[in-house]
């Protein structure tokens, strides 16, 4: 079974440009999460989809970030315009059940390393 | 401060030795998970321990959970150079997983 896949694995863009990250969750997983790790710091929650609906987007840093999950399958995270502080590794995770329920395991992708120069 | 805080922040050991990492958290949890991140790579799930469990084993890994002290430990026995990575505990409460800052483990061959 394919795991969570993320594209691209690495992106280098200039400040002010736009970048779109993509996440393909495990087939059948309704829950999709985005996390971000800024260099040397903790991994922070960004948002949570249940199917195509945003369940919780409290972690989105500002309105330069837009996440979508059309049709409840893959998700995209667009950063427009990108700033230097957006550099970091962006992780996507999916789960069959809601993370936090007693037995739920989240499956993470390899992450997209974003470098804004 | 963070929900999950790992201790120590960095650990350097010789191959073959055991490595112990600790995680403390502040609120009640549903489960706690440990993840590993190799340099430049994604997060790999290591082990999940439920709030009603006290100890769990998986290969060379042993995880304990003490909900009264709100702490967990990850023990890696007979460490290998390939264990060099950052290790994160992640506490799960309702629908959210919160990560700590991680412990950077270096295993010297």
Image (cartoon, coloured by chain):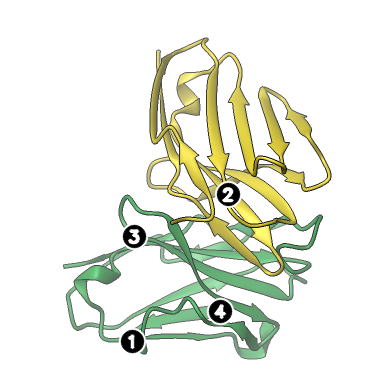
Chain colours: A green, B yellow
Label ID, residue A64: 1
**Nearest to viewer (mark 3 / mark 2):** 2
Q: Which residue is mark 3?
A: A38
**Is residue B20 rendered to the left or right of residue B7?**
right
Query: CB atoms at circles 1 and 3 under 8 Å apart?
Result: no
Chain letter for the residue marked with disc 1 in the picture: A
Q: Residues within 10 Å of mark 2 (few under 14, many from 20)?
A: many
Given residues B33 and A86, the one toward you in this image is B33
Chain letter for the residue marked with disc 3 in the picture: A
Q: Where A7 falls versus B69 (above or below)?
A: below
Q: Where A107 falls versus B13 (above or below)?
A: below
**Nearest to viewer (mark 4 / mark 2):** 2
Residue at point 64% right, 68% down? A25
Q: CA distance from mark 2 to mark 1?
A: 31 Å
Q: Residues within 10 Å of mark 4 (few under 14, many from 20)?
A: many
Label ID, residue A21: none
Residue A73 in the image: state x and y as whole percent: 66, 80
């Amino acid at each position: 079974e394919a795991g969570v896949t993320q594209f691209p694995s690495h992106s280098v863009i200039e400040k002010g440009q736009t970048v779109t990250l993509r996440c393909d969750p495990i087939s059948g997983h309704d829950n999709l999460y985005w996390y971000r790790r800024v260099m040397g710091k903790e991994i922070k929650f960004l948002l949570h989809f249940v199917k195509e609906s945003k369940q919780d987007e409290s972690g989105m840093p500002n309105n330069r970030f837009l996440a979508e999950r059309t049709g409840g399958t893959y998700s995209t995270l667009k950063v427009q315009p990108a700033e230097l502080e957006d550099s970091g590794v962006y992780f996507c995770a999916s789960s069959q059940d809601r993370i936090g329920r007693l037995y739920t395991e989240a499956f993470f992708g390899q992450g997209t390393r974003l470098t804004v120069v | 401060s963070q929900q999950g805080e790992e201790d120590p922040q960095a650990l350097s050991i010789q191959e073959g030795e055991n490595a112990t990492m600790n995680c403390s958290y502040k609120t009640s949890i549903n489960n706690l998970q440990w993840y590993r991140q190799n340099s430049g790579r994604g997060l790999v799930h290591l082990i999940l321990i439920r709030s009603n469990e006290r100890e769990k084993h998986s290969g060379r890994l042993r995880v304990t959970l003490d909900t009264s002290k709100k702490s967990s430990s990850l023990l890696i026995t007979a460490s290998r150079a390939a264990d060099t990575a950052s290790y994160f505990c992640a506490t799960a409460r309702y629908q959210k997983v919160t990560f700590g800052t991680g412990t950077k483990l270096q295993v010297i061959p």
